[in-house]
Image (cartoon, rainbow, N blue to C red):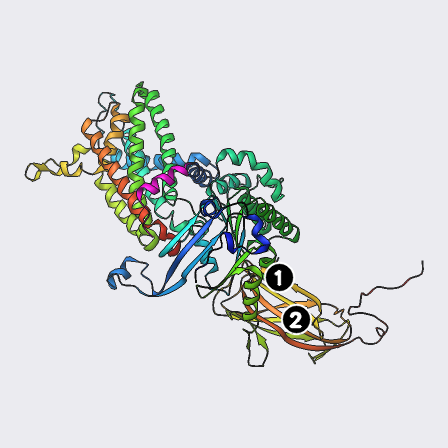
Amino acid sequence: MAKRSIRTASREVYQYRELLFNLTRRELRSRFRRSFLGWGWSFMQPLMMTAVYALVLGSFFKVLPPTGDPSGIDSFAFFLLAGVIPWNLFAGGLGAAVGSVAGAGGLITRVWFPRELLPMSSILALGFSMLIEIAVLALAVTVFYQVMLLHLLPILLLVCLLEIMFTAGVAMWLAACNVKFKDVEYLMSVFLLAYFYLTPVLYAPEFIPDTPVIGSLTVRDIALMNPMARFVMAFRNILYDVRLPGFETMVWLTFWSSLVFFLGLRFFSRRSDRFAEAM
Amino acid sequence: MAFHFTGGQQTPGTSHRLSLIDEAATMTATGHIEVEDVWKTFRIFQNRNTTLKQTLLRRGRAEFEEFWALKDVSFSVPPGSTFGFVGANGAGKSTMLKVLARILVPDKGTVSVHGRISALLELGAGFHPELTGRENVYLNGSILGMSQASLREKFDGIVEFAGLETFIDQPVKTYSSGMFSRLGFSVAVAVEPDVLLVDEVLAVGDEQFQRRCAEKMDELRSGGRTVVLVSHSLAQVRQLCDHAAWLDHGMMKMSGSTEEVVDAYLASVTTAYRLDDQGRQRTGSGDIELEVEVITSDDDPLHLTTGDPLTIRFHWTTKTRMEHVVFGFVLRAADGYAVAGNSTIYDDRYATVGPGSGQIDFAIPSFPVLSGSYHLAVAITDRNTGHVYDHSPNIAQFDVTSGVGREQLQGAIDLGGAWTVQ
């Protein structure tokens, strides 16, 4: 029989959209159930990460944060948080989604539903946590620096959506591979570590050397082709500088997110018919 | 060996269901199932490439054998009828159900199922242990394709049918396996499917719940739903199904009216036993092997007296870890009458065995059976599927004498009562 096409997959995901929300809710509810801090835990991780980096880089290495333009914010902690939050969606989303199919063997071998919902719901659950984290950060920026960023809400939501699409695309690809090869999970964590330092989360893009390598193409130009670098920059523009991200960045992000989502969904849906057998 | 029963080929007993529908309408009507020339292969890997290292070392070539689970299977099920599959373990019955449920995709051939499908392959699949019964009803319902609106509407009915009103806001990990299955069944039938696929699940829960399941099945059948059933209980197939098919090693050996198919299948399996090294009749897959020891207070295990203590000791041996295992025995008199029996079916403590060997005892403090010759039938089976690992209709015999003071007793059992004057 013919392989499941991306059109069939999209239609079925749409038909099962209520299940997508239910699975997302299941992720969210079960994650913090019966833990003392409950939802508070979802803030602890980025806060802790930021506190440690701010201590090491800001106090030990004496790195000065770039001043937000035009917001005038010059806090290293805020600078880091604006990058850590989008990075956590990507890294945490992949971590949760990569095993989502292989870990749902009991479900997959017993009932049919669009398998895409498994990685998608993992990402959506993290996307939801990210929105709360962003809201808290935005509130803190407003309170501490008296800058309103409510007018940037539509573009902020758009960037969030694009990052969710981008992460979901990568996640579907990894989750499908992970059904057959269990070491995808381990490989991924190694690559994520390297990717983290290559992405300007801990530093501003201006720190990347501006020396030409190929023709007039500089190291920085190449580093900024990285879609995650662009996501971090876009979030920093909105949440730290408090201005619209550059047009070029938005085009770049839309292009990458659509392409990666499309390819990931295609890869996943063409293989999803065989998942039950591999379990 | 393709077959179709539409229009003229109906058996007399069921023709009323279709007499008003012409053949063309039947082909596309809701609840209609059409399976044509379906082939399904599984790869049995000797060395499966589950890591990238292995794949690279073998240059992507894993060693495997192809195993055809279904070979050129064709059939159609008219809307509103009940269809049963019979056949030995590994004949492809469950694979066929999974193909109908879209969990497996055939390599060749076409499957068309018109209408909404609900598969009872395992009850409560997809329940999340940390979530409450209520949350799981909504989640499981939507996995089965129900909308939130219809779930809200049916919620009370689902909970009531499962009999879980007081526990519905507890996490399901606190449920007993019976409660778990009851809730799973309630949700699955609340889907109001056009096509219901059932694999052995009616063998769960207590007797009362089984009866309610059977009633619910009847209700669905009489409500015009199509049901496809896989069961080891031939009595159940006979009772429920309008048509049946016999699968043998992935091939359709026979199909047609339930009576014919079940009779033919039964005739073939009743001869399919083997004799063990002591000449005792054995059936079953042999994945777990049983030996039984009858321990009495006398040293002679072949002879005992009513009122003596008696222990039936099951020795099991298996190469792998087995779950959902049920040990059972029936004590029969010489004429075959079943005097007593017991099993571990509702007791999870003994459900997991192996790998290796071990023993479990059934201890009777005072054996109440009166004089006669008796023999023990024993079996070790899978609780969910009814799959028989080992079964012997006569693994041990012994004689019982009633003993002094019981000469006047009638029947087979000493009730142990006493006469008093009031």
Q: Secondary structure at mark 2?
A: strand
Magenta span main SS: helix
Residue B95 point in image, percent of width and height: 44, 58
The chain to which mark 2 is attached is B
Q: Compare marks 2 and 1 and give the one earlier in the sequence.
A: 2
Q: Is residue B349 above or below residue B297?
A: above
What is the x, y in percent for residue B228?
Answer: 51, 53
The image quadrant that residue B59 belongs to is: bottom left
Give x and y (percent) for residue B145: 46, 41
Residue nearer the viewer, B32 or A117: B32
Q: Any magenta on residue B175?
A: no
List the residue tagged with mark 1.
B344
Residue drawn at x 29%, y 22% is: A152
Give the residue type that dot 1 points to: Thr
Image quarter in which the N terminus of chain B is found: bottom left
Image point (33%, 37%), residue name: A89
Q: Residues within 10 Å of mark 1 (few under 14, many from 20)?
A: some
Three-letter amino acid code of the residue under disc 2:
Ile
Position of the C terminus of chain B, as image quadrant, is bottom right
Front residue of B383 and A227: B383
Residues in magenta, as a range: A1-17
Residue under circle 2? B312
Q: Confirm whether residue A74 shows in the render.
A: no
Q: Position of residue B223 (x, y in %)?
A: 58, 44
Q: Is residue A58 left or right of residue B116?
A: left
Q: Is residue A204 left or right of residue B317?
A: left
